[in-house]
Image (cartoon, rainbow, N blue to C red):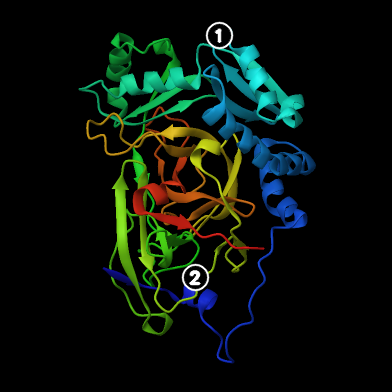
Amino acid sequence: MSVLISPLAAQAQEPSADGPAPAEEPQRITDETLREYEATSMSELEGITVDDAFDAIKRQPRVEELQAALSERGPAEFGGLYIEYRPNYSLHVLAEPNGGPSVREAITSLGFDDLKPFVLVRETLLTEKALHTAQEALGRIRGVPFTWSDIDLMSGRVLVAVAGRSDVEGAREAIRRADLGRVPADRVHVAASTIEEQDAYGGLGMDSTGEGCTSGFTVLHIASGDEGIANAAHCPNFEVVAHHSGVMLDLVNEKQQDSADAQWYRTPGLDDLKKFRTDFSGTTRWVYGRVNRTAMAINGVVCKFGKITGYGCGTIGGKSFDPDTLTGTNKYNATWIRMNSDMTSQGDSGGPWFQSNDAYGIHTGKTTCGRESENTECYSYWMAQDYLESSLGVQVRIATP
């Protein structure tokens, strides 16, 4: 299968009529740009000052290091971490009952004394592990048309959805009878909501019809060294009118199950730039890092760019979103990233999720909500970029400043 690159992509990658464009020197995003874009967007989102938002975003990579360290090397008592911005910036670190001292000691021993002024350690039965256990137990219930699930660490709840409003009460009754471990049944929130996959766009168009997908991040196939472009696997694969002097993009591999909704294309004859778009005028940023799912902090700020909705920032609501855990098909794993709100629209899939110069993931879809649903909020969700490697053997390419 091959697809063709659009005029939009040609504008970004094709040499001018006067000869090759001068090489662009990779540069990190400046504090001024960070303040203008991410900090301003976050200020409006969270109701805090731009200066406070700027400080929080500058601190976020360090918080992500703490999140990863406690998850991978911390004590068994560690129960999860999330960020709060109001009334004051704080890092809420959860611990098993009587595990607070071990978690506090680990923060020091792992080398994070600089973050301790912001840390609030709270012991609770509703840890990340306990909520995961309850989510898995719900996945074993049969006869109820569940459509997606996630955990909400900040509120200590499990979120589940059913296909229709008429199914809500039956689901609640099944949940009351289920063994959810230490999580009470009343900590499970049931709503009527389904999944809406959102075809198209990741920065550069890959067809001229407006229906097909476009690029997310440029990638490198680890085994072969081949370069290419990644986007979402659920996007349509069909050929359209030739662009970019007839250069064809060759579909190499795709996967739409487990922790991945991704595909990648070779880009013969094209200069694969290690960057992504951030606005409709063509502004781009270089990629200098990759953030894995393990390191992502709940309520951390992440931004996106899509064909329809353009640039915008939001906060991570969960990292255990499962589009179909409870449908009986078990096609996907509970590893998807759920935002706290819906930031996308039909036409945005394949698009990049990022923060500053770091790649976080590519867009997949959103949950539905509305008048016929008890789900009062819609959530955008996406695939963490590290699953490109585990599913397709490719990595987001990184520039050298």
Quadrant, the C terminus: bottom right
Q: Position of residue 252 (x, y in %)?
A: 31, 64
Q: Residue drawn 32% across and 15% down?
A: 175
> Dot 2 corresponds to which residue?
272
Query: Residue 4 at x, y = what percent?
Result: 36, 74
162 left or right of 120? left
- Mark 2, Cα crowd under 10 Å, few <14 / some 14-19 / many 20+, is some
Type of the residue with mark 1: Pro
Task: Identify the residue position indicated by label 1 in the image.
Answer: 97
Residue type of the residue flagged with mark 2: Asp
- Front residue of 145/266: it is 266
Q: Residue at x 38, y 71 (%)?
A: 207
Q: Residue 1: x and y, percent?
A: 26, 68
Q: Secondary structure at mark 1?
A: loop
Real-space Cα separation, disc 1 to disc 2, in angstroms: 51 Å
Can residue 298 be seen here?
Answer: no
Q: Quadrant of residue 17?
A: bottom right
